[in-house]
Image: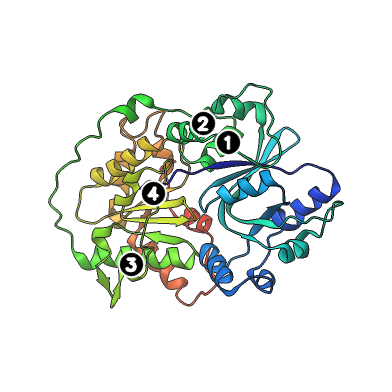
Amino acid sequence: MIKKRKIFFVMASGGGDIDRHYFDTIKNKRTIEEASQFLKSDEVKELKSCLHGQPYSVWGSTPGSGNIRTWQSMESGDYVMIYRRGKIILVAEVATKVNNPDLAKYFWGINQNDKTWEYIYFLVNEVEVNINQAELNKYLEYTSNYSPQGFMAIKQDKVDKLLLLYGDLISFLQRIGKGEKPEEIDIEKKKKFRDFIEEELRRVPTIHDEIQWRLISLGNKAHLDVWVPRGDQNRIYKGQRFGDLVIPEFHETIDVPNYIKNIDTVWKLGHSIKSAFEIEHSTQIYSGILRLSDLRTLAPNSNYPLFIVAEREKKTRVFDQLKRPTFANDYLHLDEVVKFLSYEKIRQLDQELKNDLVGFDINWLIKKAESLN
């Protein structure tokens, strides 16, 4: 069943205390080690699982019937937009949550009413933005002067419509923040999904599987969740079954197209896509780019990087295909979005990080890739 993601407004106004709290636990991330002294063992395990042991941002709400009901409705993968002085200043996903007064006092102390922000939620994929509330209101079909109040959930029908039209919220807000006008491409999304080119798969398993295995390895080293299609999860390379190295369920959401489950390798964190890779060994270059094109058509406002991974001598052919009007149009911009990684580069990166327990930043991989422009 496809999960419906909720979106919550969170007020971060109210004077020096709130400003300091934002700095202490949003701007400055906290470690699992310091929180573990206040959490149950299963809560620590869940936190480590959600965040891959990495530092986190965290926020909370004080007791009150409205706040408690809102917090209780909050689930992993839901979105949070932090609002201050007429602007959305941060968007993130909920990783997990706890009700813990002691941990809240450790983070934020108590307020003038002797209450603490005990209804806590940990955040992942947080991105700072600077968006006037009035600009967002028109996409949510609010009046231009609407302002959120306190800690509240946006009505689900508004959320569903926004995510169906414009894709994942984080990418959508980033585009608005850059002054772009997200395109719906409704005519494309309403078309019956085209029949894909039938092609005989004559790949050499050892090459394709090796590169897919290395992409899985790199994704794990980046502290990300990795997905490969179910049909690939029983493949084995160097004695390792792919299904033992990747997440068992994709966790479909309304704003992430189901089609992405068919891409060769997908990196995720929480419910958000971080990157997608198509490996082209014996299939035609055009077919791999077409799969990325279909994905882009279904999620035109997404901003995660897409990669074609192939032998180095195929790079020119990949770039020639990306120049075709079918792909290099004003909606898809595949000539700008799709990057090229050679087998040699993937092997080199995986080897360099062989004994690296710290991991690497995905932006480093993007810099190592080659672009048409």
Instruction: Please report the residue visible at 23 percent of the width from the left and 44 percent of the height from the top.
Output: 287
- Whole-number angstrom distance, CA of label 2 to CA of label 1: 7 Å
Badge 3 element: helix
Check disc 1 and report the residue beneath it: 154
Check disc 2 and report the residue beneath it: 158
Residue 156: where, in percent of width, then height? 51, 36
Front residue of this view, candidates 289 and 226: 226
User: Mark 4: few, some, or many residues within 10 Å (few <14, many ≥20)?
Assistant: some
Are the residues flagged by discs 2 and 4 in contact, CB closer than 8 Å?
Answer: no
Residue 341: where, in percent of width, then height? 38, 55
Front residue of this view, candidates 178 and 46: 46
User: Mark 2: few, some, or many residues within 10 Å (few <14, many ≥20)?
Assistant: some
Q: As displayed, is residue 343 above or below residue 371?
A: below
Total label count?
4
List the single residue furthest toward the front: 65
Check disc 3 and report the residue beneath it: 213
The three-letter code of the residue at mark 3 reads Trp
Are the residues flagged by discs 3 and 1 in contact, CB closer than 8 Å?
Answer: no
The three-letter code of the residue at mark 4 reads Glu
Please state if 271 lies on the left or on the right of 296 as rendered: right
Q: As displayed, is residue 131 above or below residue 359?
A: above
Instruction: Please report the residue visible at 85 percent of the width from the left and 51 percent of the height from the top.
Output: 113
Q: Earlier in the sequence, mark 3 or mark 1?
A: 1
Badge 4 element: loop
The three-letter code of the residue at mark 2 reads Lys
Q: Which mark is residue 178?
A: none
Please state if 334 lies on the left or on the right of 282 as rendered: right
Q: Which mark is residue 252?
A: 4
The quarter of the picture where residue 313 lies is bottom left
- Whole-number angstrom distance, CA of label 3 to CA of label 1: 41 Å
Are the residues flagged by discs 2 and 1 in contact, CB closer than 8 Å?
Answer: yes
